[in-house]
Amino acid sequence: EELLDVRKRFAPVRISAELRHASEACAESFSPSLAIKAIEEAEELGLDVSQAREELLDVRKRFAPVRISAELRHASEACAESFSPSLAIKAIEEAEELGLDVSQAREELLDVR
């Protein structure tokens, strides 16, 4: 029971730290997975995580265009043997799920391919 109390007390601090870390990352290393995990664990503890989910969504929306550009640049610079647009495709699909306009990115990907 004491461990549960400690986890509940520290969950918001952990979420804030992971969201801050995700928002300060560069495009190539951006990964919200630790923030997502912290939010899910806090939710399992019965804590209200609605604000944290909104902040995470904002961070993901802010990084989506940067991530797409990085992945398209990486794909266009690859040699024929190592060319793989899968990360660019994934970044575009995730941005589209976030409600962002990805038409320009799809055109650029088509040009790269």
Image (tube, helix red, strand yellow):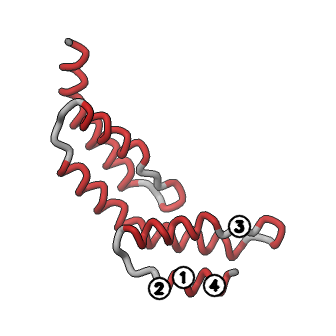
What is the C-alpha distance between the residues marked 3 and 1? 15 Å
Residue type at mark 2 is Ser
Q: Which residue shows up at 46% across the image and 52% down it?
A: 31
Q: In which quadrant is the C terminus drawn?
A: bottom right
Q: Disc 2 designates what residue? A: 103
Please provide percent x and percent y for residue 48. Answer: 16, 41
Residue type at mark 3 is Ser
User: Which quadrant of the view contains residue 75?
Assistant: bottom right
Characterize the local packing of mark 4: few (<14), some (14-19) or many (20 or more) Cα atoms within 10 angstroms: few
Please provide percent x and percent y for residue 26. Answer: 47, 58
Q: Earlier in the sequence, mark 3 or mark 2?
A: 3
Q: Disc 4 designates what residue? A: 110
Residue type at mark 1 is Arg
What is the C-alpha distance between the residues marked 1 and 4? 6 Å
- Looking at the image, do the residues carrying marks 3 and 2 touch, with CB atoms under 8 Å apart? no
Q: Which residue shows up at 58% across the image and 84% down it?
A: 108
Q: Earlier in the sequence, mark 3 or mark 1?
A: 3
- Looking at the image, do the residues carrying marks 1 and 2 touch, with CB atoms under 8 Å apart? yes
- Looking at the image, do the residues carrying marks 3 and 4 touch, with CB atoms under 8 Å apart? no
What is the C-alpha distance between the residues marked 3 and 2? 20 Å
User: Which quadrant of the view contains residue 49?
Assistant: top left
Residue type at mark 4 is Leu
Q: Which element type, helix, strand or loop, lies under badge 3?
A: loop
- Looking at the image, do the residues carrying marks 4 and 2 touch, with CB atoms under 8 Å apart? no
- Looking at the image, do the residues carrying marks 1 and 4 touch, with CB atoms under 8 Å apart? yes
Q: Disc 3 designates what residue? A: 84
Q: Which element type, helix, strand or loop, lies under badge 1?
A: helix
Please provide percent x and percent y for residue 47. Answer: 17, 36
Q: Is residue 19 left or right of residue 94?
A: left
Q: Disc 1 designates what residue? A: 106
